[in-house]
Amino acid sequence: MKHLRLFTYIDTIVREGSVRRAAEKLHITASALDRRVQDLEEELGTSIFERHPRGMRLSAAGEVFLGYVRRHLSDMQRLRSEIDSLNGLRRGHVALAVSPALATDFIPRVINLFRARYPGVSFSVTVAKHGDAIRALLAFEADLVVIVAPPRHPDVIDLAVSEQPLMATMAHAHPLANQGALRLSDCVQYPLVLPAPGLTSREMLESALHGRRSETHIAAETNSYEVMRGLLPGTQNIGFVIATGRPQDHPNEHIVYRPISAVDIRPVPLVCAQLKNRGISVSAARFSNCIAEELNHMDLTEE
């Protein structure tokens, strides 16, 4: 297993950007770590790092070697998980990259459901826009992504998909609160709290609002769904979230959610995905099943 320790050293240097910072994280001396890298480069017959005053950068050979390193580290993680699953999945770790719209309620709720069954499994969760989430997956920084309207990539495969309509959200006393599905023309009669550019819900709105700029009153823009919800009570403001962005366990009694008609804005896919040629751990596979079950339950409830 000694080579796996060296692989961990190389991976940490890449992530930290310098031998000094990596050594601090690994709890070894910088000189010892640098010596291990030099020994490896001598054995390979080529430099895997370019050394600069501000840190280390991978060479072309290093980029190839890093892919080899991360595949082996991932395989070892999966092997340990499979061995542990023989004893009831007593431990494990799942690294997630998720869309901002899912970070407040959906992902925490599913993680808590999962950990109630498997308390030995821990999670790391990175909130990222869909392009950054895919890059984290490709760099082996995430086991799974759970994102809305992801860009298609040949090395990424979908494990679960759910179509997500856009929802208008407003105070319970709002004039539109008692209606069913809303047309966008209904919403633009009131002040709008728009998601910030770059968020999927904003992308869904953008083309539909393009021809209505003159009649649109924008009260605020924010990249925080918590801030958006905070701007609704006691006003006639209307915010927007995807369907999974609605709180399920602890709904806010002062806020209601109404679907926007698909005639105006088509639903977008929410996807749980993994890297195509990467074997994921048992804990990650079971968590993806948990995501799929929760999405299926939500779809049936909406029907």
Image (tube, rainbow, N blue to C red):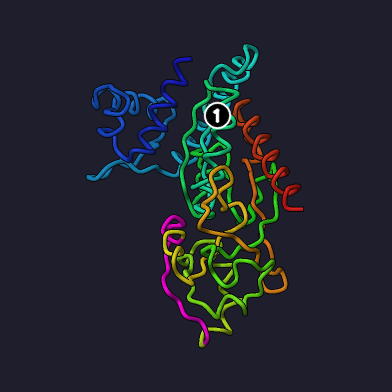
**Quadrant of the rendered image containing residue 110:** top right
Magenta residue check for 224: yes
Measuring 52% from the left and 77% from the top, which residue is drawn there? 190
User: Which residue lies most toward the top here?
Assistant: 87
Residue 103 versus residue 66: which sits nearer the camera?
Answer: 103
Q: Position of residue 98 (x, y in %)?
A: 53, 46
Of the residues shown, which amino acid type is indicated by label 1?
Answer: Ser
Question: For this view, does 52 lie left or right of residue 298?
Answer: left
User: Which of the 4 quarters of the picture holds residue 53?
Assistant: top left
- Can you say whether 193 is above or below 90 in the image? below
**Magenta region includes residue 34:** no
Front residue of 46 and 239: 239
The crowding category of the residue bearing disc 1, from other C-alpha atoms within 10 Å (few below 14, some 14 to 19, many at least 20), is: some
Percent x, y for residue 113?
59, 32
Residue position marked by numbered label 1 in the rendering: 74
Question: In this view of the protein, can residue 230 be seen by the observer?
Answer: yes
Query: Residue 23 placed where, x, y %?
Result: 28, 28
* Span of residues in magenta: 215-228
Q: Secondary structure at mark 1?
A: helix
> At x 62% / y 80%, what residue is drawn?
185
Q: In the drawing, does residue 189 fall left or right of residue 262?
A: left
x then y, percent, for residue 25: 31, 28
Q: Residue furthest front?
A: 173
Tag count: 1
Taking 63 as reference, is 53 left or right?
A: left
Q: Quadrant of residue 106?
A: top right
Picture layout, residue 49 above or below residue 177: above
Q: Is residue 134 visible?
A: no
Q: Is residue 239 above or below residue 45?
A: below
Point 60% across, 31% down: residue: 284
